[in-house]
Image (cartoon, rainbow, N blue to C red):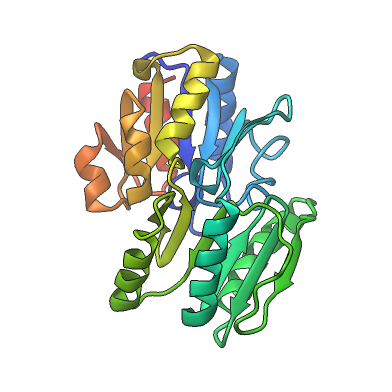
Amino acid sequence: MTIKLMILDLDGTLLNDQKIITERNKKVLEKLHENNVKIAFASGRTNFMMRFYQEPYVKCDYHLAFNGAMIQNLKTGEMLEQITVSDQSARKVWQYLADNADTYTCYSKDCMYFYDMTKNTVKNKYKKYTDIAKAENIILKQKVIKLDKYEIPQKIDPIFKFVTYEKNEKWLSNFRQYIETIPDLTMEATGYDVTGVFDQKVSKENAVLNIAKQLNINKSEICAFGDYDNDLSMFNAAGIKVAMQNATEALKDQADYICPNNNQDGVARFIEENLL
């Protein structure tokens, strides 16, 4: 196999369940880099929650944040893509969530807004990120703003995504039906019990194609690893598609290969056996 671009999902794929990249995975990515393979991390996470997954922590050339809504060249700092939700549509979604959701978040480039009625779902998730960053001596500098029930700020920066943590299928069905009434939006599950709302042009596939165009490479020279259904679109842009053993059945069905799970250095083991 000869590849020029490696695309890696983070949670459930490159990251183990402790949300870290193991030394074995780090060393393999460094070897790929030495072989002139470009490395990109593709995640539903925000840009500031991906910040500590870059050099010197690990070799990486591009970050595809917000499910592909933001693409950054980490070597130059250049933003190659920034797709935000229109102001009008953002207001509609925010109003719906303020009226109907117990827990939700909303993200601009440098700020996280959240409402968390009872369970500290958002606080607990965010603390995990900040604890990992502190362990690597990295300070996350984004603003975090807690909202009151029904509160919608009057002045906000452009929004990249909304997130709900609802598990109730009926609630999610009603929310999806509402989002479908707004033509420029799309809704997608981006992780277990996490659902995101983005501009309709946003997908990991489009982000990968953007980078491929920048690098002037074709599909056969791209390898992608994933574990969840939002990686299906990313697979469309890759010549080599690898699903983790812990991946959803839908993703496994579309994969060329299945590697060991994210707690068994699955990414490293596949690369060692097939690409190095």
Which residue extends farthest left?
253
User: Does 36 appear above or below 191?
Assistant: above
The residue depicted at 57 percent of the width and 64 percent of the height is 91
What percent of the width, then of the height, locates residue 244? 34, 45
In the rendered image, is residue 18 in sight? no
The residue depicted at 27 percent of the width and 45 percent of the height is 251
User: Does 231 appear above or below 198?
Assistant: above
The residue depicted at 73 percent of the width and 36 percent of the height is 56
Residue 54: image quadrant is top right
What percent of the width, then of the height, locates residue 236? 31, 31
What percent of the width, then of the height, locates residue 53? 64, 43
The residue depicted at 44 percent of the width and 26 percent of the height is 209
Front one among 127 and 232: 232
Left/right of residue 46 with respect to residue 187 in the rendered view: right
Which residue extends farthest bottom?
118
In the rendered image, is residue 108 in sight? yes
Front one among 181 and 2: 181
User: Does 273 appear above or below 251?
Assistant: above
Front one among 13 and 164: 164
Work out which quarter of the rendered image holds the C terminus and state it. top left
Residue 39: image quadrant is top right
